[in-house]
Image (spheres, grey):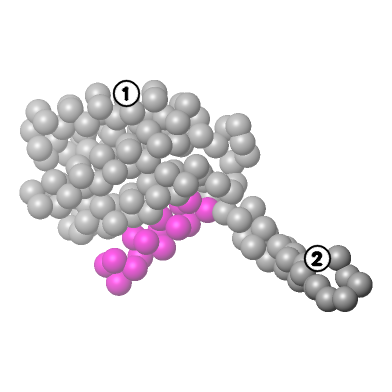
Amino acid sequence: MSIIMPIVIGLIAVTILSLVPEPHRRPLNAILVGGAGAAYLSGFGLGYWEFVLPVVMAYVAYRGLKSWTWIGVGWLLHTVWDVFHHLKGSPILPFSHDSSFGCAICDPVIALWCFAGGPSVPGLIRARFTRKPPTPLITGPGRPA
């Protein structure tokens, strides 16, 4: 369950974020990934190194204003920070020992969606079920090929 729930949470987050209409979806996600860079500041679990991620993520978020790829990179950077915190025993939520581990599983789900260009999940589902099958090519005497 410690792996399944973070994946489900990531899928729920992606679905909710995909409801934001374009052209606002990418800038909102850039802001969110920038904010994620400051998630560990209050715990100070890695000492002064905690100031590195917010600075890097601010740059990544700025680049993410124009590029889904940079937003995906930001979520993967956050994943690395989650792993450091999990190994150090300094979780993102002090009352939940495995919260950084869960975040390290959830963040790549969001990153994959970003690398795909942040598509609308309801739009993808609609397109999947409304797609018409291709017309078969019928050939024979008197019929065009």
Q: Looking at this view, is 91 or 120 the one in front? A: 120
Residue 59 circle label: 1
Q: Residue furthest front?
A: 141
Q: Which residues are magenta?
A: 1-15
- Residue 31 in view in this figure: no
Give neighbour class at mark 1: few <14, some 14-19, many 20+ (Cα, 10 Å). some
- Amino acid type at image mark 2: Ala
Q: Amino acid at mark 1?
A: Tyr
Residue 71 within the segment the image draws in magenta: no
Within 10 Å of the Cα at label 2, are there few (<14), some (14-19), or many (20+) other Cα atoms? few
Q: Is residue 12 magenta?
A: yes
Which quadrant, please, contains the N terminus?
A: bottom left
Q: Which residue is mark 2?
A: 145
In the foreground, 45 or 53? 53
The mark that comes first in sequence, 2 or 1, is 1
Residue at the spot x=17%, y=39% of the render? Answer: 43
